[in-house]
Image: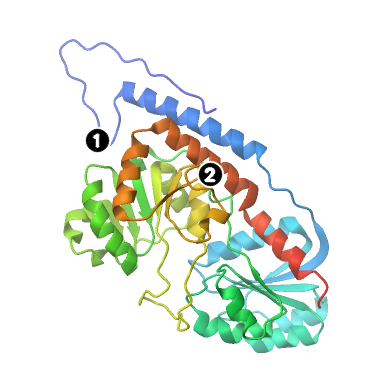
């Protein structure tokens, strides 16, 4: 448990005690410090005793990053850092490197490609002709299926974070397709001690796709008396943006550490999945419905805060609603549940702690990449 320091206030005669802006009074600060220390101690206890089992495979793996830079680079780093724990030798290259020259010299057993949208399939075909197994993990399904439909058949193994894309790729001749959602990199997303000035009741971090705009148009009036933050692209799409702009970080795209601090700083973090048919940067020309959880699902829960998510079809495979997370069906339902959990502190914390435990047990990149390696090393039928 975090060390709690008490501050003794001197008695004042007639001079009133002034508060600094965004700072608690000393008595309030002691109480907040005690509460946070107690919560943080509970989280650390779960972190210390929940370790996903893994073993090191005696093999050489070539990991080819997305090569896209930010915001994909944190994902590249998360996967690369995790693979170093799981294989005896790991080589990391970008799509622009001399991959064929390296593979000819070193002959890795398996090449794993992340995303693959900027990686030429001719190189994959050459790797396969050399006897090197190949696997791709699609990270944005189904929103780029116009492109991925032509990439997937060039790989020995296809992994997708969207369950509905499994039959889609099988219909295109892929023999070994597996459903594998992304996970959480616990070096980035974990319980932390956030700055006091960031703390509040509710936050949402993400781009303002139109389904999110419609939801928050209805929700924001119910949140007006709460301390909340929105952050991301396009929030000036809100019809009443001027009214809420002092609580919105417009156009801000945060890295994982800053994002995790925001999650830690708020009692409830909202998750709203992107609609499969949104018109913004969407190349889902096959109109494949999305039913699987996004990476934000696992990242929020890994911070030990209460995840409140829209109820996607596959979500119950990963968390038990009402026990490890909270789900909502409408803006009204969400607003009612936010009011309830913000006034039932212990119940909110217990759900968040159970969500943290489930995430660390089942949904880290150690778990996900262990599954990928096990499947990608099975005998080819």
**Mark 2 or mark 1: which is in front?**
2
Of the 4 image quadrants, the one containing the N terminus is: top right
Where residue 367 sits in the image (x, y, percent)? 67, 55
Tell me if mark 1 has few (under 14), some (14-19) or many (20+) residues whose alpha carbon lies within 10 angstroms of its own: few
Q: Residue at x 33, y 66 (%)?
A: 211
Q: Is 243 or 69 nearer to us in this picture?
A: 243
Q: Is 192 or 223 nearer to us in this picture?
A: 223
Element at badge 1?
loop
Q: Tell me which numbered mark, 2 or 1, is placed earlier along the sequence.
A: 1
Tell me if mark 2 has few (under 14), some (14-19) or many (20+) residues whose alpha carbon lies within 10 angstroms of its own: many
Depicted 330 relative to depicted 236: above or below: above
Where residue 191 sits in the image (x, y, percent)? 52, 41
Q: Quadrant of residue 226?
A: top left
Q: Is 247 or 213 nearer to us in this picture?
A: 213
Element at badge 2?
helix
Query: Number of numbered discs present?
Result: 2
Check residue 21 in the rendering and tell me which mark sits there, or answer none: 1
Q: Residue at x 43, y 37 (%)?
A: 348
Q: Quadrant of residue 207?
A: bottom left
* Residue 192 visible in image: no
Where residue 4 sits in the image (x, y, percent)? 47, 23
Confirm or deny contact between disc 2 and disc 1 (CB under 8 A): no
Quickly name the residue at label 2.
355
Check residue 176 in the rendering and tell me which mark sits there, or answer none: none
Depicted 313 relative to depicted 110: above or below: above
Measured in 3D between alpha carbons, the distance from the residue under mark 2 to the one under mark 1, in whole angstroms, is: 34 Å
């Amino acid at each position: 448990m975090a060390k709690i320091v008490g501050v003794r206030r001197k008695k004042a005669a007639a001079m009133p005690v002034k508060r600094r802006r965004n700072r608690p009074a000393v008595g309030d600060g002691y109480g907040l410090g005690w509460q946070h220390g107690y919560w943080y101690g509970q989280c650390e206890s779960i972190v210390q005793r929940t370790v996903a089992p893994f073993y090191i495979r005696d093999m050489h793996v070539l990991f080819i990053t997305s090569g896209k830079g930010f915001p994909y680079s944190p994902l590249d780093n998360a996967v690369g850092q995790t693979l170093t724990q799981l294989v005896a030798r790991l080589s990391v290259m970008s799509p622009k490197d001399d991959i064929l020259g390296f593979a000819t010299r070193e002959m890795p057993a398996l090449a794993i490609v992340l995303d693959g949208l900027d990686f030429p399939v001719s190189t994959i075909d050459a790797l396969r002709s050399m006897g090197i197994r190949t696997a791709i993990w699609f990270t944005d399904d189904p929103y780029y299926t116009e492109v991925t439909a032509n990439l997937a058949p060039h790989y020995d193994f296809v992994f997708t974070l969207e369950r509905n894309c499994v039959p889609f790729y099988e219909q295109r001749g892929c023999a070994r397709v597996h459903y594998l959602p992304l996970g959480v990199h616990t070096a980035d997303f974990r319980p932390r001690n956030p700055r006091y000035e960031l703390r509040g009741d509710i936050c949402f971090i993400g781009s303002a796709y139109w389904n999110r705009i419609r939801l928050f148009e209805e929700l924001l009036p119910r949140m007006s008396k709460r301390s909340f933050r929105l952050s991301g692209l396009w929030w000036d799409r809100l019809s009443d943006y001027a009214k809420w702009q002092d609580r919105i970080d417009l156009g801000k795209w945060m890295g994982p550490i800053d994002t995790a601090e925001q999650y830690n700083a708020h009692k409830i973090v909202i998750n709203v999945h992107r609609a499969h048919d949104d018109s913004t940067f969407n190349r889902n020309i096959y109109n494949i419905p999305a039913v699987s959880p996004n990476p934000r699902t696992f990242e929020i829960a890994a911070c030990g805060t209460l995840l409140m998510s829209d109820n996607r079809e596959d979500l119950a495979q990963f968390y038990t609603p009402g026990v490890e997370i909270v789900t909502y069906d409408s803006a009204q339902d969400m607003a009612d549940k936010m009011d309830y959990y913000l006034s039932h502190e212990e119940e909110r914390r217990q759900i968040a702690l159970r969500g943290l435990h489930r995430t660390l047990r089942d949904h880290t990149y150690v778990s996900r990449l262990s599954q990928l390696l096990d499947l990608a090393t099975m005998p080819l039928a």
